[in-house]
Image (spheres, helix red, strand yellow):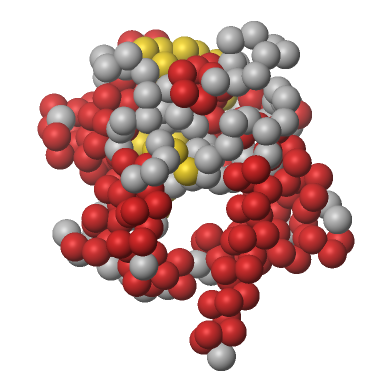
Amino acid sequence: MQLFKLEKCLLNVIFLATIIFFNTCDYAACLESAKKIKELGYPLMTYQVWTADKYLLGLERIPHSKHRNESIGKPVLLLHGLYLSSAIFTINNSSLSFVLSDAGFDVWLFNARGVGLSRKLSIYKKPGLQPKMNSISWDFSFHEMGVYDMTTAIDFILKSTGHSKLDVVGYSLGTTISLACLSDRPEYNSKINKLVLMAPTSRLKSSGMPINIFKQFSKIVNIFLDRINFFPYTNDPDTTYRLIRRMCTNQSAFKYCRQFIDFAQGIILPMNNDTILDIVSEFPQPMSSKTLKHMLQLLTSGK
């Protein structure tokens, strides 16, 4: 039975990976936070900011709720997980960014280097031109995301809002980024009011099908990651997402898309069909091989 489940999961991965790896379509815009925020009627502001080590970050902001007046509340920064962007917090009208906005918060959406708006700002020079993924140096891990990206975002938000502190919510990799930031740059602890860590990943000791597979084949995975700069590897991620979404709307293919999401999460979540389609429209975001090798190191060492 376990072997059957493993084979089924691997077939699902291969099914979508084939499209991800070999697609080389022209420029197309992906589903992003800005689009969803506008569609749902919330106010939107976007920012570009450079880190100390010269990476361009893109931040989205929902300054106030569409249901309230324009008074701006306390800032809160949302940090996404592995292979994700800020779009995971804007999937539908009950997503965390909108819940916090309706509760009176000034919501800031983080995109680590190389993903979401940060990637789009870096690889697209002009609309209509092929993106250049190699215009980003992929020599970074979650250490740099914490020490440089998170600190840059915090300083920019506090300067922009005039507040001395902000709240931070991290999910999965976002918790790892937070822990790296606050350990290596302890002075930033005084700039955070409340820190909320959802599904924290520090030692990766929890069990599950995806975790166990990567741990079992860690040497092979490392050899594979040594050959590429980022994964999934595709020349044009945004067109790939559009192609995957179109494919997943097919009734016979949809069940495999759903199973792929469940496999990636390691758990079956109660999501409707529209939510599944929105997730495959932006997942998985390209992630540096160095980040993945760093995570694998945590997994195999237990430290």
Quadrant where the N terminus sits is bottom right
Q: Is residue 98 visible?
A: no
From the top left corner, tell me how far across and down residue 69 is, in percent.
63, 19
Report the residue that reaches farthest toward the right.
Answer: 251
Residue at the image position 27 percent from the left and 17 percent from the top: 53
Residue at the image position 49 percent from the left and 32 percent from the top: 115
From the top left corner, tell me how far across and down residue 242 is, in percent.
74, 38
| Residue 149 against residue 8 in the figure, above or below | above
From the top left corner, tell me how far across and down residue 127 is, in percent.
69, 12
Left or right position of 89 against 287: right
From the top left corner, tell me how far across and down residue 260 is, in percent.
62, 62
| Residue 21 against residue 212 in the figure, above or below | above
Q: How many marks?
A: 0
Please tell me in which quadrant of the rendered image residue 270 appears: bottom right
Please tell me in which quadrant of the rendered image residue 243 appears: top right
Quadrant where the C terminus sits is bottom left
Left or right position of 14 against 105: right
| Residue 111 against residue 294 in the figure, above or below | above
Q: Is residue 240 visible?
A: yes
Q: Nearer the viewer, residue 298 or 147?
A: 298
